[in-house]
Amino acid sequence: MLRTLLPLGAALLGASGVLADSIPTCSLTQKCPESAPCCSQYGQCGVGAYCLGGCDPRMSFSLDSCAPAPQCISRVMPMNSLDRIVDVSEYLGDASKADWVAQGTPLVYNNEAVLLTMPANSVGTVLSSTGYMWYGNVKATFKTSRGAGVVTAFILLSDVKDEIDYEFVGTELEIAQTNYYFQGILDYHNSGNISLSDTYDNYHTYEIQWTPDSITWLVDGQVGRTQKKSDTWNATANQWNFPQTPARVELSIWPGGASSNAPGTVEWAGGPIDWNSADIKTYGYDFATFKDVEIQCYNATSAPGTNNAVSYTYNSWLATNNTVVNGKEGTIMNNFQDTGLDMTAGAKVGASSTASASGTKSTNANTIPGGTSNGPGTAEGGDSGSSGSSSGSGSSSGGSSTGSSSGCSTTGFSQNCDSGSSSSGSSSKSDGGRVVGGERIIGASAFAVVIALGAMMVL
Ligand SMILES: *[C@@H]1O[C@H](CO)[C@@H](O)[C@H](O)[C@H]1NC(C)=O
Ligand SMILES: *[C@@H]1O[C@H](CO)[C@@H](O)[C@H](O)[C@H]1NC(C)=O
Ligand SMILES: *[C@@H]1O[C@H](CO)[C@@H](O)[C@H](O)[C@H]1NC(C)=O
Ligand SMILES: CC(=O)N[C@H]1CO[C@H](CO)[C@@H](O)[C@@H]1O
């Protein structure tokens, strides 16, 4: 029953008439074709940004189809402007030029924080770090969103779906839910809660300390939970079910309670989302308030966990830590037609001249995952009028949003997505970690939830 999740979204997206149902999907058992070799985080094949952050080498045409991932960069990132945030439709892999890639609508608040916003009927906003972490410490100071069906998340997510989470359900404002996943394999016993004072009213500092041997979750400097690698041995698979591959930091707000989600997801998220919530009425959107984020890279002198070259790639489908290569391959593509197979085909596109990127379009392959099927920049001029129309009002003093061209567009982006189960073969995914009508309902793998904005707009 849960397998209907993705096909449902796809059907409704098709009904919106924008997303061609010819976009090839990908999974472990169905790799992308050579013409669109990169399997995005959302389980669809394309070129360009499909080959950047989130591109899963195991599901792509070949191991080297995805662009090499920028290695860890230790950074203090005060979230008081949008200067270091670039929209997904404008990012070609140069991590030195931006700290975050955005899908959705981030706004500046009072020059002191960045709001991740979720206007009515949108799929929210996600910021993904441009640099990857191969172990290390990351901490973020923020206030969560609130209300039924509204989820705030601060996670580490690798391209092969290793995941370490903080998640906050808008009806449970005194609980930080923690979780971890190995290669997206759902396990119902990995979650844990940390109690704290109201997360909507109060800033807290949430930290993940990740080493090859353990994960420690700290809130306001106090250890809330520790998970040792030594307790994660999987005798069936003969490996450690422990996150071990380079991951991006992702900050997000998303509608877990959207009607297009499976019932178990909605229940976990505190019930159906209220698109007429107090914050939407007052400000025009639900929001989470991010103040500071800091990445401290792991200081290994030999693998695993190094960052003394340029990038990370994989040399095996196993995608375990001993198959990660911290090498010298470049991470920057020339334009949105490039892939990991040829990073410098065609003319160079300046980071700001994305309009011309669509002009250079030479294939029918998709270029911006989850954003638009027509290439960069097109959603903005498209029929996106009904989405995000209420953004930008309210208390935000925000300057120009960088995000309007992608996340909240007509085609919808599945911010969190099961990239495996939509097609034949993989049956391990279900409902983001929840079991409907039977077992326990615990946790949500951030990539195991499909959010189809197209669906929401139809319903
Ligand atoms: C964490 O809190 C949520 C919300 O109250 C609850 O549903 C879940 O069972 C808790 N998880 C654990 C592991 O205690
Ligand atoms: C152990 O590995 C097997 C094979 O990959 C997998 O099917 C199973 O879910 C894993 N067990 C746990 C508890 O994760
Ligand atoms: C790595 O070393 C730097 C410089 O000594 C330090 O600031 C940082 O905290 C270290 N990172 C970790 C994860 O310990
Ligand atoms: C966390 C983890 O799985 N660590 C492994 C990294 O790879 C080495 C082999 O190179 C293993 O011994 C570790 O267990």
Image (tube, rainbow, N blue to C red):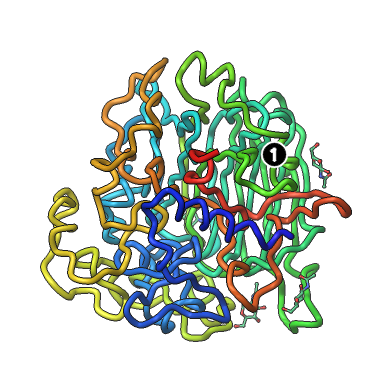
On screen, residue 131 versus residue 250, left or right, reads left
**Local crowd at mark 1 within 10 Å, few (<14), some, or many (≥20)?**
many
| Kind of residue sitting beneath label 1 | Ala
Residue toward you, 413 or 192: 413
- Farthest-out residue, right: 438
Q: Identify the residue shown where x is 68% and y is 48%.
A: 217
Query: Could you say where residue 160 lies in the image, as x and y percent from the top left?
Result: 54, 70
Query: Could you say where residue 395 lies in the image, as x and y percent from the top left?
Result: 41, 15
The number of discs equals 1
Q: Quadrant of residue 397?
A: top left
Q: What SS does tag 1 mark?
A: loop
Beta carbon of the mark 1 residue lies under 8 A of ligand 1: no
Q: Identify the residue shown where x is 66% and y is 30%.
A: 170
Residue toward you, 339 or 199: 339
> Is residue 23 depicted above or below 403 in this figure?
below
Placement of the N terminus among the 4 image quadrants = bottom right
**Ligand 2 falls in quadrant:** bottom right
Q: Quadrant of residue 156?
A: bottom right
Placement of the C terminus among the 4 image quadrants = top right
Q: Identify the residue shown where x is 61% and y is 38%.
A: 151
On screen, residue 81 versus residue 301, left or right, reads left
Query: Could you say where residue 16 lies in the image, as x and y percent from the top left?
Result: 42, 48
Q: Quadrant of residue 330?
A: bottom left
Query: Could you say where residue 138 lies in the image, as x and y percent from the top left?
Result: 53, 49
Q: Residue beneath label 1, please?
A: 269
Q: Identify the residue shown where x is 80% and y is 55%.
A: 435
On screen, residue 219 versus residue 187, left or right, reads left
> Is residue 454 depicted above or below 4 in this figure?
above
